[in-house]
Amino acid sequence: MNDKSMLTDLLGQFNSDTFSIQDFVINILITIILTIILGMVYKKYGKSLSNRQRISEIFVLLSLTTMIIITIVKSSIALSLGLVGALSIVRFRTAIKEPEELVYFFIAIAIGLGMGANQRAVVVIGVAIAIVYILIRNQGIDKRGSQQNLVITLFSDDKEQLIDEQQVFDMLNAVGNAVELRRFDTGNGITELSCNVSFNNIQDILTVKEKLGQLGENVKISFVENI
């Protein structure tokens, strides 16, 4: 077989009409179900300080978009090459703060890739194993309700009443989860301290507010949602 015949056979394989509306709809439904489950697992067991509710809502669209693209380009070598050229000029600027977020995004993309290639068994088994691993890893961890992630900022310009950062950390760790220092500035009698903190419920937030109020009336405190 000469090179021309090999090229013709290759193009024939890519251009073969194997598209099925029924399979496409089934793949879409499976993709939506898997990504919804993935989002629920991420919201319940994720340790990211970002807003997990908003991030989990992206999973379905991300998987569906990936699946549609793969479904379109898998039957045409020309479209495949065009996709490579189009992606080469796209620059993503999504702020992924933690590796855990990236892992879940990759799982969502893998779902879309697998379902777009009509590899249902591989995708379902792979995602099931990943979810089981997450459940086992987090077994015994108390996740009471949906968590609230906040940025807590304390500011004081009173030279006689500086903020004791260790005292602040002790107060936050006593009630909140996953306390993470974002910023700490001090000098010329001015102190500013910002932390990411995850809370189990509103009552914990009110408890921290009361504890931080004991630092002094000149200390300004702000609670902002971490988005």
Image (spheres, helix red, strand yellow):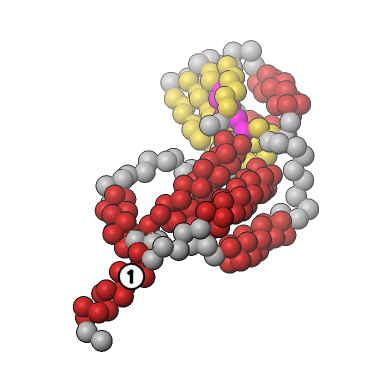
Residue 152 on the magenta segment: yes
225, above or below 108, in the image: above
**Residue 38 or 115: which is nearer the viewer?**
115
- Where does the image place residue 215, in percent across and percent down from the top left? 65, 21
- Where does the image place residue 25, in percent across and percent down from the top left? 56, 51
186, above or below 99, in the image: above
* Residue 76 sits in quarter: bottom left
* Residue 78 sits in quarter: bottom left
- Where does the image place residue 27, in percent across and percent down from the top left? 57, 55
Write the residue at 66% across / 61% down: 128
**Residue 224 or 57: which is nearer the viewer?**
57
**Residue 43 or 84: which is nearer the viewer?**
84
Q: How many residues crowd mark 1 within 10 Å: few (<14), some (14–19), many (20+)?
A: some
- Where does the image place residue 140, in percent across and percent down from the top left? 78, 53
Q: Which residues are magenta?
A: 149-154
Helix, strand or loop for the magenta stretch, by majority: strand
One can see residue 90 in this view: yes
Outermost top residue: 217
Outermost bottom residue: 1
Q: Is residue 227 left or right of 171 when viewed as pictured? A: left
> Would you name the residue on which mark 1 appears?
12
One can see residue 99 in this view: no
Q: Is residue 132 left or right of 221 when viewed as pictured? A: right
Query: Which three-letter amino acid code belongs to the residue tagged 1?
Result: Gly
198, above or below 163, in the image: below
Q: Quadrant of the N terminus?
A: bottom left
Write the residue at 53% across / 20% down: 155
Q: Considering the numbered disc 1 on the image, is that residue within a helix, a strand or a loop? A: helix
